[in-house]
Image (cartoon, grey):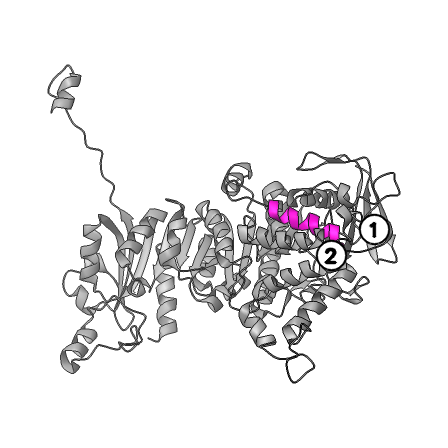
Amino acid sequence: MKTKFTTDTKLETEIAYFENINLKLDSGDIIDSFKLAFKTYGKLNADKTNAILVCHALTGDQYVAGNNPITGREGWWSRMVGPNKPIDTNKFFIICSNVLGGCAGSTGPKELQNGSDVAYGGNFPSVTIKDMVKAQSLLIESLNIEKLFSVIGGSMGAMQALQWAIDFPDRIFNIIHIAGALKHSAQNIAFHEVGRQAIMSDPIWKNGKYFENNEVPERGLSVARMIAHITYLSENAMHRKFGRKLQSRDIISFGFDADFQVESYLRYQGKSFVERFDANSYLYLTRAMDYFDHDETFRKNIEFSHNPNNHLKYLIVSFTSDWLFPTIESKMIVNQLNSLSREVSFLEIDTDKGHDSFLLEEPQLDDVIKGFLTKNFAKIDE
Amino acid sequence: MNKINSIRKDWSLIETLIAEDRKILDIGCGDGGLMEQLENNRNAITHGIELNRDLAANAIARGFNVVHGNAELDLSQYSNNSFDYVILSQTLQAMMKPKDILSELLRIGSKAIVSFPNFGHWKIRLQLLISGKMPVTESLPYTWYDTPNIHFFTIKDFLNLCNEMNIVIEKSIGLTSKGKQFDISESVTGVNFFTHEAIFLLSYKNFEPIKIKSSKKVFAKNSVIAN
């Protein structure tokens, strides 16, 4: 496999081109060539044993730490990844790539179709979590890394980490799986469907061809984001943050302005999301999450496809107030691993910050990630 | 003996019951202290369960395989005979259903190690006899209304239960309140009186397969069904 690497100075990102690779997707479709935008942090050691792949969530990107040129803000996990941070870049070599189907430089609906000057839009093939991981595995291969020390992710990132454990158990030492599940639940599919309907019923969407007139289905995409954002919080966190406080006024308006702070906050979230995310990408990636399901097959996969000498370690973390990926979903993974006597650790962190907790200040999360990585790295480094 | 010393002593005795290179489940593993000791001194592969969130987090941060959970609910997920030893140190008296836990220990592990404070110790008997109030001692330091220890039992009670459940006591170690160590099975009189803490190595009785001899040389199918 020959991979071409370039640097996109405008997007401040590395890009890996996989040409004539004929990537076969879950759907049966084949992408003959594709590219992945990725960032790395820290240095790969001489033995190439310190590489960690961080997988981003639904609306994340490869900008884990440092500056994100798209938003002009700090990377999405800069509190977790960096020098002397829990995922320590002085010690580890961190790789994060924008998922297949994403919109931060990797091949996705926003990018031009191979050999044409038209973007994919709705012609982009359906991608799954498994496809994303397959693409990542090619990137890791082309970086000449035989075995990743760890694959770490929250939410959709956790799905990818679990998929790595299923598909490439011999190419990783451990996974850290935060706020994820074996499957996307009916309720989660339902929320995603409402979001997609919001986008698709925006007249500007035009079956995904909005880019032809240089337009964006802003209304639909921002409503989708507003709905999703509610599911990332918890009732307590919302109450603590906003209560019934009014926004820039002392009395209610008896109209439909954003009277309440919570309304104003959601409107802001929706609006700023439109500036950085592609509506078609949102459709494809939410669909990929919906299709994720290892409920019936996980145990058999782990039992039969794994080399018994392969002591793959699992760290599973959930949050008490996460109602999108509740603790019980994490415990199902833990149960199945325990029933096969696999090396698994599990912690439910007590917090009211909801699903988004993994991105926020949670000292206990920092402690277990840091300890788990440091101690287990010392073991393989012996 | 203070609480910490008593636990260290408990651990070092548990260690003497464990062979090298075995797979161990420590129930109520705290921050992994005993697991660490057994990994270092016995080259054990260790797993733990801990109910307390902060202790479980500490154990995980210290690199141990620890599941944050409730043993009374979560033991069922482990497969039969998936460990060589299952350890329950100083916790049986705090379980809702000690009998069920005991049978779970020996389902999951080939052997179980159980340690507990003896409620039959003379100091405890004397306290109850003289003061007429629920005893409070070094190893059972809680008042009756806030104690996690909800099932008090003596060595005699424990031996009776093992007998009833066809559990064999392979080894037993007793400790007096001064920390003197002795073999419970070899002591004849007064064991239940002066044992302060007890540690047992348990396994299930191995039943010999029953051999039935037939008096008839020809085995008639019908007779089997009829009789």
Magenta stretch contains residue A279 = yes
Closer to us: mark 2 or mark 1?
Answer: 1
Q: Which mark is residue B51?
A: none
> Is A19 left, or right, of A345 in this rendering?
right
**Of B114 and A216, the residue lying toward us:** A216
Indicate the chain on which mark 2 is placed: A
Place residue B41 in its image quadrant.
bottom left
Q: Mark on residue A61?
A: 2
Residue A231 lies, in percent from the top left, at 59, 61
Specify whether residue A42 is in view.
no
Q: Residue at x 54, y 50 (%)?
A: A186
For disc 1, the marked residue is A211
- Nearest the viewer among A285 and B50 is A285
Image side of residue B70 versus residue A71, left or right:
left
Q: Secondary structure at mark 2?
A: loop
The tag earlier along the polypeptide, 2 or 1, is 2
Q: Chain of mark 1?
A: A
Q: Amino acid at mark 1?
A: Phe
What's the magenta region? A277-291
* Residue A75 against residue A134 in the figure, above or below: below
Residue occupying the point 25% across, 66% down: B151
Q: Position of residue A257 (x, y in %)?
A: 69, 73
Q: Position of residue A294 (x, y in %)?
A: 54, 44
Q: How far is the residue under mark 2 from the one under mark 1? A: 21 Å
For the C terminus of chain B, give its image quadrant: top left
The residue sitting at the top extreme is: B218
Hey, what amino acid is under mark 2? Answer: Asp
* Residue under the point 79% across and 42% down: A34
Q: Find residue A340 and report its horizontal and vertical position in percent.
A: 46, 44
Mark 1: secondary structure: helix
